[in-house]
Image (spheres, rainbow, N blue to C red):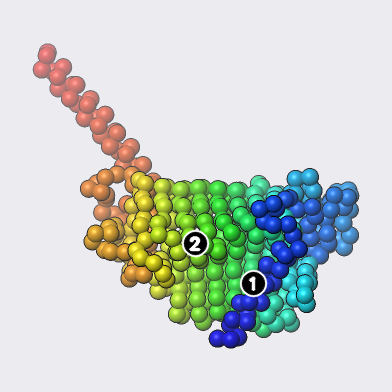
Amino acid sequence: MKTIRKMIVVVLVAALLPLCVCVPSALAAGAASVWVNNMELTASAQYLANGSTLASATPPASGGYAYFNSATSTLTLNNAVINTPYEFVMLGISTWYMVFAVGDLTIDLVGENSISYTLSGHSYSSIFGIGANNGSLMIGGTGSLKDLHIINSSLESYAIGLYAGRDLTIGSGSLNIIAQATESAYGIVALNVIVTGGQTQIEAIGRQIVHGIELPGTQFRMTAGTLSVTATASYATAIPLYYVNDISMEGGDATFSGSAPSEGYGAMIYSDTVNYSGGNFTYIGAEFALRREVGGAITYNLTDGAVYVSENTDGSSLRLWSAAADGALENSAFRYVKFVPIYKAAADIPQTGDSFNPWLWAVIAVLCTLLGAAGAGLTAIKRRRRLD
């Protein structure tokens, strides 16, 4: 237990120490520079070509590169290959970052980009894919981060895919994030996570504590896009959506799946209410789909929505849930919970097992319209015959 506590303290200190030298979070401003491939990009040296060890004021003649606009605190990754970490040292503690900035940072993805590295030989160490310390991180663009894959193979180590001291927003683009460590791994750590578009896959793999998205008791909100979050722990706890105090499911398509020998959950919820108004959201857990450690039963505010449940992680034998008949969703026998829109009244739900699929309802609506029109036409013909 002492060893685990020590490791938790180390990773938290490693992540939060840089904040001590920055302005308070309420006054956070845009990043003035950014480290990429262990090189600092500034207002006078904005470009870094793939494979180069020197930042330049002019763009490369060919090939991929990183470009930093200090006026907007925007880092453009244009077919960039990032494979060398920056070592941040404070009070004798080292933390490694593939991309590092202090303050707000916007990532603009162009083309196909990759960030990959395996850290070894540094016990109790932490490595981050992209870190915006004391600031917000916004990711978008027309391109992709095809491979953000960081591994920490050091003894009792940590890996974090994306980190933001404040909000983390995914607006567009395609992201594939893998964080893997011998001890604990986190796909995203941020104060709030907002997804408004894009296609994002997150996978966290470790031994002890594995969280896909970790929020310190704040908000997860999704309005559009697709999101797949998987947490896998070989020994202890796997939770793809952890410590969330405000869930707002408004649109898009998301799946959260947690697998571990002892504690595998789809989400760990600390709020008294969960809000749903659109989209498809699925929570899968080897033990519980939804888990709450403290407090009473959660109130689920469903606006034009319904919940389907199954005791099986594959979603087989899926059925409509009701609080009156089934009790609480959280800490229950349900290992598969799906929030979906209501397209028809409950009495009209088809018995196909696909009542939560929007395309099915669309087909039914079209057929009903055609049948109604055909019926009206037959009635009109019969009336004419009677008059004749």
Mark 2 or mark 1, earlier in chain: 1
Quarter of the image for residue 376 reads: top left
> Considering only vertical position in the picture, is 116 above or below 122?
above
Picture coordinates of residue 325, whole percent (x, y): 23, 61
Q: CA distance from mark 2 to mark 1?
A: 18 Å
- Quadrant for the N terminus in the image: bottom right
Query: Would you name the residue on which mark 2 appears?
Result: 244
Q: Say which amino acid is labelled 2.
A: Val
Query: Would you call the spot at circle 1 few (<14 residues within 10 Å), some (14-19), or many (20 or more)?
Result: few
In the image, which disc is placed on residue 371? none
Q: Residue at x 29, y 54 (%)?
A: 352
Is 280 displayed left or right of 324 in the figure?
right
> Considering only vertical position in the picture, is 290 above or below 91?
above
Q: Residue at x 40, y 74 (%)?
A: 287
Judged from the image, the secondary structure of the residue bearing numbered disc 2 is loop
Quarter of the image for residue 51 reads: bottom right
Observer able to see residue 77:
no
Query: Would you name the residue on which mark 1 appears?
Result: 12
Is 195 displayed left or right of 338 in the figure?
right
